[in-house]
Image: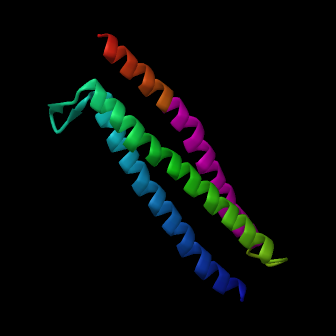
Amino acid sequence: MTDITIILVTLPAFMFEYLVSVWTLRWINVRGDVIETGAVQGLPLSTEARWIKLYHEWAPLLFSQCAFLAIVAFGWISLALELGHSSVRALVYAYAFLSGVASLGFSVFGTQNLLRMISMLRQAEVD
């Protein structure tokens, strides 16, 4: 394949990855807001329902996002290795770097957010 063909194939794939990530982040944030506020459309949720939402909606979405981005990063690295000495190899490595950093960021800050929500829900049980 020519360099321009590789760019024309990888750029839409990277944009698709980005859009999926943004869409999933929106879902994660909406569900996190429900857990934090304890209300859905103005109706209160019990603490038990908030725990369920945390472990059955929010956490799986977050960690599947981390896994998705990590898998895609490894895919980009594999593709870059197959390109040999192509001039677009650096571009594909950049895609891998951005995907890997996003995965790491979601992992670190998501875990921090998870611990904060657990603490908040434990405090809500006491109150």
- The residue segment tinted magenta is 89-113
Residue drawn where x is 56% and y is 68% of the image: 14
Q: Is residue 44 left or right of 1 when viewed as pictured?
A: left
Residue 103 location (% of width, % of height): 60, 49
The quadrant of the picture occupied by the C terminus is top left
Q: Is residue 78 above or below residue 51?
A: below
Q: Quadrant of residue 23?
A: bottom left
Q: Extreme bottom residue here? A: 1
| Left or right relative to 107: residue 87 | right
Quick check: is 81 in the magenta stretch?
no
Q: In the rendered image, which quarter contains the N terminus? A: bottom right
Total marks placed: 0
Dominant secondary-structure state across the stretch colored magenta: helix
Residue 68 location (% of width, % of height): 56, 57
Residue at left offset 44%, top offset 20%? 119
Taking the image as shown, residue 82 lies to the left or right of residue 10, namely right
Q: Position of residue 27 (x, y in %)?
A: 36, 49
Residue that extends furthest to the top in the rendered view of this protein: 127
Render colour scheme: rainbow
Question: Is 95 within the magenta?
Answer: yes
Image height check: is 52 above or below 46?
below
Residue at image point 49% right, 68% down: 16
Residue 122: % across, % down: 39, 18
Q: Is residue 93 left or right of residue 117?
A: right
Q: Which one is in front, 87 or 70?
A: 70
Give the image quarter of residue 125. top left
Q: Is residue 14 above or below residue 115?
A: below
Image position of 68 with respect to 34: above or below? below
At a point 44% along the width and 48% down the height, the residue shown is 61
